[in-house]
Every structure is written in structure tokens, then in C-alpha cells.
Image (tube, rainbow, N blue to C red):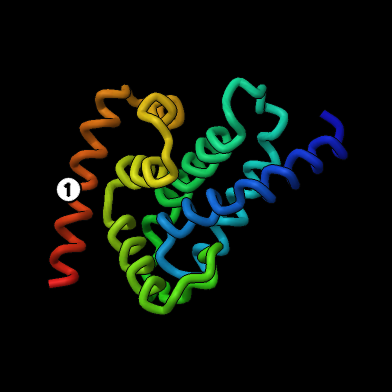
Amino acid sequence: MNDSKREELFTQWMAEHRAIVVKVARSFASTNADTDDLIQEILIRLWASIDQFRGESKPSTWIYRVALNRALTWKRDTGRRPKTAPTDDLSYVAATTKADDQYHLNRLYEQIRQLSKIDRSLMLLSLDGFSYAEMSDITGITESNVGARLSRARNTLMAAISEDTA
């Protein structure tokens, strides 16, 4: 693929699906600086992998696969990094929300970050309406395992949110 075609496709993908990249980064990084770094790394990986996209899946599925794989690798590689204060700046949220909604959204991301890497990935895909088959394709686990893990992850999130509001 020539550079102008690659640039055109990348620009189109980011116009339509940038929120996927931001959502994945926010779910794996706990500070604004880390979120920025991870977004950059995901974008670089997407750019480098454009030639591998064969059109056998939707672009959003491909973007999720690349973003989640990069986030998982990033998380593993930075696992020994000292933790800093969690992010409370919601400038990364694509849609403007009310202050109360921002607080709850931030709390939700905090709880999602507490899930295991695969459960976190599945939760993000579920929130975006992907089917179990699509989640299975993206993550490489069976559809039945997707269902079981999502059920447990949802229960974990509901319990944490219930405790938070009590």
C-alpha cells in the first residue's frame, strides 16, 4: 500500500474510531501521562499494521484487536513502574458530559481498571456492543468462555459500584 493510501485510511479510521483508542488507553492506564503515552503507542501500532489489514473484519474490530494487544503488552512492560495518583481529568472523554456524569464515568473506569486484563478487554468490547463471536475473534478465547468471563466481570463491577454508592 502506498503512503498516500495508508494516510487516507488511517485518517478515516481515526475520524470514525478514535474513541476506541481512547477508551482502551483509559482502561489500561491510570494517569493522564500514561494514557497519553499509551494512546501514542496504539496509534503508532495501528499505523504500522495498516498493511496487514485485509478487510476480513470490520475496521473497528481490527482497531480493537490492535489496541487491546498493544495495551496488554504495554501493561505487562510497565507493570514494574511506580504507580502515581490516578487520573481525575476527564479531558479524554469524547462526549461532553455533566459534572455528575463525569464523576460516575471516572469511577467506572477506575473499577474497570481493577479487572484482569482479559476481563477488562471483554468489558470494553461488550460496552461497545460487540457480539460474543466478535469478542472471541478479537481476544482469541472461545465464545462460551467470553460469556462466562463477562458474566463474572459484570458481577464484580456491580458489586464494586454498589459498595461505592453505599
Dividing the picture into quadrants, the one containing residue 87 is bottom left
Classify the position of the N terminus by image quarter: top right
Question: In x, y percent, where is residue 75?
Answer: 42, 51
Residue 69, relative to residue 162: is it above or below? above
Give the left or right position of residue 62, taking residue 79 as reference: right
Identify the element where label 1 is drawn: helix
- Closest to the observer, 33 or 99: 99
Residue shown at 24%/36% (left/top)?
149
Q: How many marks?
A: 1
Question: In x, y percent, where is residue 120?
Answer: 34, 47
Residue shown at 54%/72% (left/top)?
91
Classify the position of the C terminus by image quarter: bottom left
Dividing the picture into quadrants, the one containing residue 104 is bottom left
Question: In x, y percent, where is residue 55?
Answer: 65, 24
Question: In x, y percent, where is residue 28?
Answer: 41, 55
Q: Which residue is mark 1?
A: 155
Furthest toward the front, the residue is 98
Residue shown at 37%/76% (left/top)?
85
Check disc 1: other Cα within 10 Å, few if <14, some if 14-19, many if 20+. Answer: few
- Closest to the observer, 11 or 97: 97
Residue 157, relative to residue 107: is it above or below? above
Amino acid type for the residue under numbered disc 1 = Asn
Residue shown at 28%/60% (left/top)?
111
